[in-house]
Image (cartoon, grey):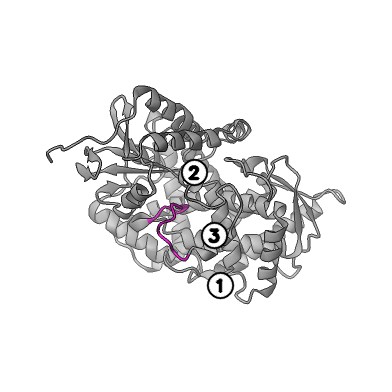
Amino acid sequence: MKSRTRLPKATALESAAFFLAVFLPTTAKGPIIRRPKVEAGAERLGLDDRAVRRMAKLARKYPKGPLMLRLPGRKQAVVLRPEHLHYVLANSPEPFSPASSEKKAALAHFEPRFVLISEGRERTARRALQEQVLDAHCPVHHLAASFIPIVREEADQLLRGIKDGSPAGNMELGWDRFVQSWDRVVRRSIFGDQARDDHELTDMLAKLRENANWSFLKPKDKGLRTKFLSRVEDRMKDAEPGSLAFSMAKMHPGQDAAPVDQIPQWLFALETTGMATFRTLALLATHPEHLAAAKAEVEQDTTERRHVPFLRACVLDSLRLWPTTPVILRQSTRELEWPDGDMPARCGVLIYVPYFHRDEARVPQAHSFTPERWLDKNGDEGWPLVPFSDGPVFCPGRQLALMLSSAMLGSLIEKSSFALSSPQALGPEKRLPGALNNFSLRFTVSGSQPHPSREPSA
């Protein structure tokens, strides 16, 4: 391609400021598994708000784009305009491949044949398998009759544990207790009841994800990876009817589909859904009107928590405010012509999601909890809101994640009340902060009435 003009290019100082204000804090928090101490520091120092302001400053100065950065040894562009965001995601995986160099290096630590870092025939087979197993386009998963009772059982067990293990009048829920219950939901949904207490599986993945945070900077622990994937394969072989792994095995996927390598992402991604669920509980606990609407929906629900639109919208707006995937990476597969200039081949393309989700010029009430926006939006593609990415490479588990998270929230608020006891300022009259550290959230629980007839399977 003969170059016409070059895309706008940031100065060396602007590129350094982007690295220090946006890229470094985001990666320091942990792109694959969160680092609690860094999350706490980012929340305390308001680093996410600073990153959004830095992006807004660049967008004002460079109305065209994407903007090329000056980085040593790397061709890198950053997306500043909503129309460019949509264009990149709509044209993935070709010519904007999700298999960027950084992502390949990171995910290879624990899922070397996962669909996001695959290409060609193998990617096609793996994507088709993911979409089919996860019911990517269906709000109610075909295994909902198996999954929803699991969620309710674990929620009841969680509430019972809080009541039985706390002094009278001092019932408290923190992240550690919540995530143990959530991980049981995830393991049972993926493999069946036999995996409910397989904490070792979760711990192995956590260690591999910690290594993956360093991407190509840390050698791969091939021994642990082999042990982990072997454990996943054994669990898949023993998977019980009504689980995702059993459903996938029945499809008899071919070798190209690499079914074992697709499962770790379910464990990984659904854990981050737990983070969004816990943050949503904090929002509901501090927004009485929205909590009342959610409780009313639960009381009137006739779907047994399979599809509760308002609670799903609450989770979506929590993800808008605090995306669990703050950066979307793509890489150009060839030289590309943009209206404002040319992009070279193998150029990294970075979308900083919080900037678009908090863009005051584009998003009404950008810093407020307004789940109604997701009920009124009606698929308007002009909105730069992408909590599950978008386009052909959208997250295939988004509907399942929303179903499980809204079911958990419904089960918790149905018979119990939660008051935020940690110091985060989240009231309806406040500007919600750019970061919310789920590890530090704590709730005082009252009126805990789990259903005595429901007991989680052993």
Query: How many numbered marks are there?
Result: 3
The question of residue 384 being in magenta is answered with yes
Q: Which residue lies furthest to the top in this view?
A: 13
The amino acid beneath tag 1 is Ala
Q: Residues within 10 Å of mark 2 (few under 14, many from 20)?
A: many
> Where does the magenta region start and end?
378-390
- Depth check, front residue: 48 or 261: 48
Q: Is mark 1 on a helix, strand or loop?
A: helix
The residue identified by callout 1 is 145
The reply to whether the C-beta atoms of the residues labelled 1 and 3 are less than 8 Å apart is no
Query: Considering only vertical position in the picture, is 312 above or below 91?
Result: below
- Depth check, front residue: 171 or 205: 171
224 sits left or right of 304 in the view: left
The reply to whether the C-beta atoms of the residues labelled 2 and 1 are less than 8 Å apart is no
The residue identified by callout 3 is 373
- Depth check, front residue: 232 or 302: 302
Say the numbered circle drawn on residue 354.
2
Residue 157 at what x, y percent from top left?
A: 71, 59
Please tell me which residue is depicted at 59% across the width and 36% down the height of the picture.
36
Residue 289 at what x, y percent from top left?
A: 70, 60
- Depth check, front residue: 70 or 308: 70
Q: Which of marks 1 and 3 is nearer the N terminus?
A: 1
The amino acid beneath tag 2 is Pro
Q: Is mark 3 on a helix, strand or loop?
A: helix
32 sits left or right of 89 in the view: right
Task: Between label 2 and label 3, give the one nearer the viewer.
Answer: 3
